Amino acid sequence: MQHVIVGAGPAGVVAAETLRKLDPDADITIIGDEPEPPYSRMAIPYYLIDNIEESGSYLRDPDKHFKAQNIEVVQQRVDKIDAKAKKLTLADGSSRDYDKLLIATGSHPISPPIPGLDLPQVHSCWTLEDARNIIRLAKSGSSVVLIGAGFIGCIILEALVKRGVHLAVVEMGNRMVPRMLDEKAGGLLETWCKNQGIDVHTSCSVDGIEAAAGDQVEVSLSDGSKLSAALVITATGVKANMDLVEGNDINTDQGILVNRRMQTSNPDIYAAGDVAQGVDFSTGNFEVQAIQPTATDHGRVAALNMAGKDDEHHGTLNMNVLDTVGLVSCSFGLWMGVDGGDSAELYNEDEFQYINLQFEGDHLVGASSVGKTQHVGVLRGLIESKIHLGDWKSRLMQDPTAIMEAYVACTQELSYS
């Protein structure tokens, strides 16, 4: 059996390892289009602040692990999939046959339509090559403009501050991390960042970037202000890498559409990770969920089914945990609530503390918090377990900080029932 995996991120690596456990004799190949060994993008911020060497981002020991697992790793771009012939054409002109194919090509940064993005001082922060450019330009004391204050942007923000730069952040939304936090929580985060000396511009966009004196650029904002910078970083969202499946009669939407077995509309082709539009734990809908826990879950389930096992993916809880210059924020599940649901909220602006619980019936279905780190694991556990809260719902409506007591009481009830 020939298993080929296109994509060398967490989904692809976990899939390859799972396949090897299930089928010791199969030919297993990972094809990645970057010159580095398989690595984790989530480790890049640690590389930016010198907490790890570049090799610390590698998912596995490239000199030993894959050879020991008898997994071939090919560093080459795949140009074409011929699903009828079950063949891949690579950029160097070579080809690969497959019996089962997994597409785990991830996503790529979206470039906003801003004049000047092609200047050498402008970079995204998505690859190790991007990280090298940022390290080269983001010297201590230099001025940096970060376009986008979403989840990825705020992870980069933390690393930039630790590098000692003068940082300005520009976000089109009316708050920071608008897809993770509501207005109150996002407002707390913005105030916190400003208190740390970060120049935050919300409800604002970049109109253009122009070369200026020396190695600087001038960034023009929609509010009429101008910012000088040695480096501009774009973090304005990502889009699934679906180009490979074009012309192969494989169904796509926001990502490659898969069933619960991670199988595409072609029974011998599977998809996993950021490129796959899989089932969401909270809604049961099929959505792109670009987080690493989902990618690894996808990879495992895809591999089980590629190897002939019958396994279904029941969805991964959408969750984000963010440490922004010392202030921890998080969101889980349906943090924005559901129609007809109830909610409970605590808001302490002076102490930078916020917690919001969202209920459907007596189930906790979503939550978000700022500055309440002791609740992070409990919030996730209550949502994922779908525990009936019973009388504890009314108590939480009065005091949402009693979440730990509710969790302990409800799980003890289950253990005795």
Image (cartoon, grey):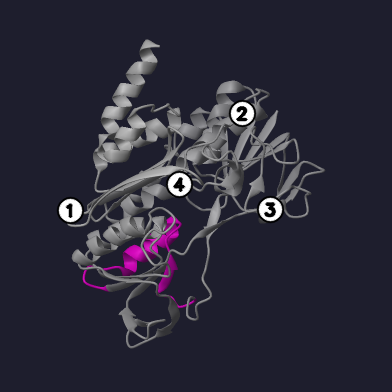
The tag earlier along the polypeptide, 2 or 4, is 2
Residue 92 visible in the displayed image: no
In this figure, which residue is indicated by the disc labeled 1? Answer: 351
Callout 4: helix, strand or loop?
A: loop
Residue found 30% across the figure and 33% down from its top: 395
Q: Which amino acid does label 4 sit on?
A: Gly
Q: Which amino acid does label 1 sit on?
A: Glu
The N terminus lies in which quarter of the figure? top right
Residue found 31% across the figure and 81% down from its top: 228
In this figure, which residue is indicated by the disc labeled 3? Answer: 244
The C terminus lies in which quarter of the figure? top left
Is residue 246 shown left or right of residue 131?
right
Depth check, mark 1 against mark 3: the one in front is 1
Is residue 79 shown left or right of residue 414?
right
The tag earlier along the polypeptide, 1 or 3, is 3
Q: Distance between the residues labelled 2 and 4?
A: 27 Å
Residue 31 image point, x, y percent: 60, 45
The tag earlier along the polypeptide, 1 or 4, is 4
Counting other residues with Cα less than 10 Å from the Cα at mark 3, is it few (<14), some (14-19), or many (20 or more)?
Answer: some
Q: What residue type is labelled 2?
A: Glu
Q: In which quarter of the image is residue 165?
A: bottom left
Q: Residue 124 carries which label?
A: none
Residue 185 visible in the displayed image: yes
Q: Distance between the residues labelled 4 and 3?
A: 36 Å
Q: Which mark is residue 312?
A: 2
Stretch in magenta: 118-142
In this figure, which residue is indicated by the disc labeled 4? Answer: 337
